[in-house]
Each structure stands twice: as C-alpha cells, then as structure tokens.
Image (cartoon, rainbow, N blue to C red):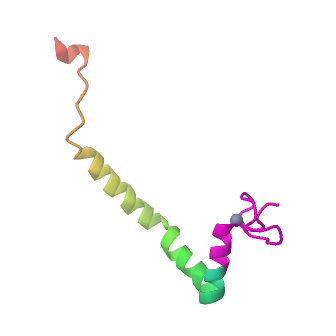
Amino acid sequence: MVCVLCEKKSVENWFGSFCAECRQLKNLGNVYGFERVLDILKKCCIRDTNQLEKKIDVHKKTVVSDESYITPKTRSKAI
Ligand SMILES: [Zn+2]
C-alpha cells in the first residue's frame, strides 16, 4: 500500500497509512502544531522574487570569480 501523504513510498506497517518520513512529519505536526510546521516550511523553503534575485546575483559573482575557468582559444586568437 502507498503512503497517503507523499503517494510514492510504501507504508511503514501493513496497518499504517504513512511511510517512515511522512510519519516523522506527522509526529512533528502533532508536537508543534501543523500551522507552526507549515509556517516554518513556508519561511525556510519558499523564496520570494526578491530572495531569488539575490541568490542569482550571488551565483553570478561566484561564477565570474571562478579562477579555474580557462577561456577557450578561438582560431582568431591563436594565430
Ligand atoms: Zn510518505
């Protein structure tokens, strides 16, 4: 039987409804409250447009400053 939450992995036990990972998620929700867990996931995992632009800028800077990159020689430069 397939887990009712992720719908991918098989259930932990023959009488269970969740896989091992989803069971942990459910337990966290039971302890901290599902609203709190959802709020934390939204704040940590979902990025807004501004955050995405900052991430892209940081990535561009690291790519440009990569010293291991060797510029390929074209025929016009080799002659
Ligand atoms: Zn699952």
Report the span colored magenta: 1-26
Write down the quadrant of residue 17 in the picture.
Answer: bottom right
Most distant residue in the top direction:
79
Residue 32 at x, y = what percent?
59, 88
Q: Residue at x 77, y 68 (%)?
A: 13
Residue 36 at x, y = what percent?
58, 85
Viewer-nearest residue: 27 or 56 = 27
- Vertically, is 23 above or below 52? below
Is the stretch drawn in magenta largely helix, strand or loop?
loop
- Asked whether, in this view, residue 29 is left or right of residue 78, the answer is right
Is 50 contained in the magenta span? no
Query: Number of callouts in the render?
Result: 0
- Vertically, is 15 above or below 74? below
Viewer-nearest residue: 54 or 65 = 65
- Asked whether, in this view, residue 43 is left or right of residue 15, the answer is left
- Vertically, is 35 above or below 64? below
- Could you tell me which quadrant the C terminus lies in? top left
Q: Residue at x 29, y 46 (%)?
A: 63
- Could you tell me which quadrant the N terminus lies in? bottom right
Q: Residue at x 68, y 74 (%)?
A: 23
Is 21 contained in the magenta span? yes
- Asked whether, in this view, residue 61 is left or right of residue 11, the answer is left
Q: Quadrant of ligand 1?
A: bottom right
Q: Residue at x 18, y 18 (%)?
A: 77
Residue 49 at x, y = what percent?
47, 64
Write down the quadrant of residue 7 in the picture.
Answer: bottom right
Viewer-nearest residue: 25 or 59 = 25
